[in-house]
Image: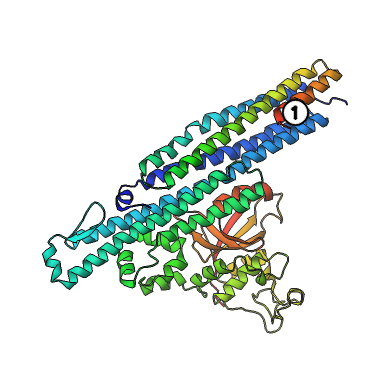
Amino acid sequence: MVDFAQLRDAKPDLWQTAADDWLTLAKEAEQSARDIYDNGASALDEHWTDQVGQHAGQTLKDLANLFEVAAVEIRAVVSTLDGLADAAKLAQSSLHSAVDYAQRSGMVVDGSGHVTMSDPRTMHNDPDAQQLRGESQRLIDEAVAEATRIDQDASTELNRLKDAVGVTDLDKAMNEIGAQASQNEVKLMADALPTDQDAQTVAAWWNGLTPQQRDEFARAVPVQLYDLNGIPQDVKDQLKGNYGYDRVELVRWAQANWDNKDIDIFDNNCTQFVSTGLEHAGMKQTMSDWTGTFDDDGWGHGGQTGWDWLDKHDHSHTDSWASADANRNFMVSHGGQTIPLNQARPGDIVYFEQAGPGGPTDPGKVHHAAIVTSVTPDGDIHYTQHTDSRLNVSLNDRLPHNEVTEGDQNIVIVRPHPNY
Amino acid sequence: MVIAMDPGGVSATGDDLHKIAGDAGTRTKGLFASSDAAAQGNQGWASGPALTGCKTAWQDQLGKLIQKTVQAGDGLKDSAGNVAGTDQEAENRLDHVMHDWSGK
């Protein structure tokens, strides 16, 4: 458990410096893997072609794989340290604001975080002073509780990552170990929210944040922020947005249904997941009365029977509903805006466009779509998807691996804004 | 079994592996110190000892991977050298060398 003094005296920037060094380590491991493939295994294919040479080549490929696994797992440490640094900074800032609030209200905060009136005799007869003291104490205790939650989750994750050293399966490293660290990075930001406080305390907490800190919460944990009792209504309205669908509901739905297979009816359901989420969040369908789901310029579906086979085969979805490339084209040509990566926000759609050869589709075409569900303060975009089902996975962590297996990718962020 | 090897090319590949290992060792050497500093600068946080444990485990693991890369380079250079006097005995020695550095 972190106490008042330990939070007050913490140096979150040191977590950040460590995270930066771990990121360099991950890149070094990635570079070693590439070098061993290119200068070792591939060279042997040319210079040593008999059975023993093939065995040697395979051994080098196995070694390169171990470096690649190491890179993935080290990136998981980076995610954890980034999340720890960002969340701890916010909790410490909340503590400083609470102490400042108490002192400006004429109170004294001792070394253990206990709040008293500078003149205790005054407080006995002054209900307002008693209330101020109580509120100050709650804010201080809340900041310490946030730090404790953050520390527990971060230390648990770091211990888990220590135990995972030695894993040799790249798939396991990527889809289990790395995926959980990505989810945990988002959770660390949620840990820094005053989730169990009354509206008055939440409002005081919110007022103590800088505009940048407010935006960090809005981008990282929009649903949890929206659900806090005491957040101003105009902030909640901004979170929902004015884009023809409720962006908070889209994120909430995606995070609640990331592993709900009942939604799936196609072989690949990534775009079906995006479209179903947007419809749930209020985006209106549009289809020609004449051509219905065959409308090349529409987005929607016909009546659904609930029988997956029939719903899949009866041509009851527009191409833009279920195909990632058509979905991107529809959104962009109907009011949607392509957004620079560093301005992505939860509720946007992320598309994976093939940039180079060797991928699942032709260069220039989109082959995958997902919902942006969080952008952590380090700028990392976390997305949620189907086929395969993944929750809040990190783009920074997955992209290097995806580019190895699928060729170079362009990441395209679109903010839908239907204009029909 | 017929040996199909270009000893010069294989030896050069061994040199490349030595260089890859050397570069990785040099470039990663100082990158763990900041984890110790973070743990020391955040007394009372359970994340400090947890990071130290993680650091120790990964420092060890990366050291092993770099060492394996060195051994792979050694194995290739030894194998290339053995092929100079190609005969059945050399073939047997190759197999031994390969098994030694691959750990299989």
Q: Which residue is rendered at x = 60% and y = 32% of the image? A: B64
Chain on which label 1 sits: B
> Amino acid type of disc 1?
His
- Residue A93: where, in percent of width, then height? 32, 55
- Residue A64: where, in percent of width, then height? 66, 37
- Residue B1: where, in percent of width, then height? 88, 26
User: Element type at marker 1?
Assistant: helix
Mark 1 surroundings within 10 Å by alpha-carbon count, few (fewer than 14), some (14 through 19), many (20 or more): some
On the question of residue A289 being in view, the answer is yes
In terms of image quadrants, where is residue B84? top right
Q: Which residue is rendered at x = 32% and y = 64% of the image? A: A205
Q: Is residue B38 above or below residue B1?
A: below
Q: For mark 1, what is the residue?
A: B99
**Is A105 in front, or is A413?**
A105
- Residue B11: where, in percent of width, then height? 72, 22
Q: Quarter holding the C terminus of chain A?
A: bottom right
